[in-house]
């Protein structure tokens, strides 16, 4: 094997060699395998207390929720760039001694989810959705929106990012929607939608009549504001 000469930092002063044919993919795979088998990421959480001595509950936590991507499309270069930036934040806070739980998230609402489901079902108009039935169409949206979840997990792991997929969150979960709506429950009474979707066509009927999952949060926000007290 050929080595490039390198100045030694050892006390002996003996020059050390650096391989001229480093196989980075092999190094990458070896490190990722070690992290997985060792449970390094989870240990970085478990070995740090959530509370500082004498501090309030959670005083040593740094909360980081990964901005959720759509899983009905494959990741691209933009996700690669932002992924590294997000990873730096968590690692920096971990090195400062903080307990950093990093839950991965999935964006499952909005026009992309609706259009992809319509495409897969061969639909072009809202009347076809209504004929199929809202519940069935919503089920199709839920199935479609997580289509590439496994590819995303592989992609993010290959980036050497530390994230928690086992406790991930999805914006379609009722618990998630309620957690977002609670802080603003008083304002949602007066909220008026300003956008529509492919099935609504017009903004005016979005809140009460949108027959798709992509506007479900608007309908729910109205119901929640009526039935739940302000926190």
Image: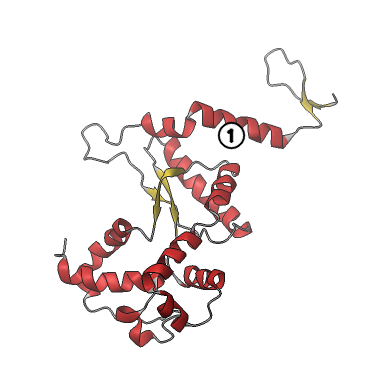
Q: Is residue 108 visible?
A: no
Q: Is residue 199 visible?
A: yes
Indicate whether 104 appears above or below 22: below
Is residue 154 toward the left or the right of residue 203 in the image?
A: right
Seen as rendered, the residue at the extreme top is: 12
Query: Where is residue 158, by image quadrant?
Result: top right
Is residue 14 toward the left or the right of residue 61 in the image?
A: right
Which residue is at the front of the view, 8 or 149?
149
Which residue is at the front of the view, 17 or 65?
65
x and y percent of residue 169 in the render? 39, 52
Is residue 29 toward the left or the right of residue 177 in the image?
A: right
x and y percent of residue 230 in the render? 16, 65
Which residue is pictured at 43% across the width and 70% down the height? 137
Which residue is at the front of the view, 222 or 145?
145
Which residue is pictured at 52% across the width and 27% down the height? 37
Query: Where is residue 209, by image quadrant?
Result: bottom left
């Amino acid at each position: 094997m050929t080595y490039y000469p390198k100045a030694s930092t050892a006390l002996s002063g003996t020059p050390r060699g650096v391989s001229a044919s480093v196989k980075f993919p092999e190094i990458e795979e070896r490190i990722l395998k070690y992290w997985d088998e060792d449970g390094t990421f989870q240990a970085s959480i478990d070995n740090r207390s959530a509370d500082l001595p004498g501090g309030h509950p959670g005083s040593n936590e740094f909360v980081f929720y990964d901005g959720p991507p759509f899983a009905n499309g494959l990741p691209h270069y933009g996700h690669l760039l932002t992924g590294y930036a997000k990873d730096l934040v968590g690692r920096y806070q971990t090195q400062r001694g903080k307990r950093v739980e990093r839950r991965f998230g999935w964006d499952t609402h909005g026009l992309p989810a609706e259009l992809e489901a319509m495409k897969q079902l061969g639909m072009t108009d809202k009347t076809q959705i209504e004929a199929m039935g809202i519940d069935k169409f919503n089920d199709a949206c839920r199935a479609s929106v997580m289509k590439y979840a496994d590819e995303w997990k592989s992609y993010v792991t290959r980036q050497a990012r530390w994230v928690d997929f086992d406790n991930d969150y999805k914006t379609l979960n009722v618990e998630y929607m309620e957690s977002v709506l609670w802080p603003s429950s008083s304002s949602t009474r007066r909220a008026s939608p300003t956008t529509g979707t492919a099935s609504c066509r017009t903004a005016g009927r979005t809140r009460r009549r949108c027959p798709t999952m992509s506007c479900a949060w608007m309908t729910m926000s109205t119901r929640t504001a009526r039935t739940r007290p302000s926190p």
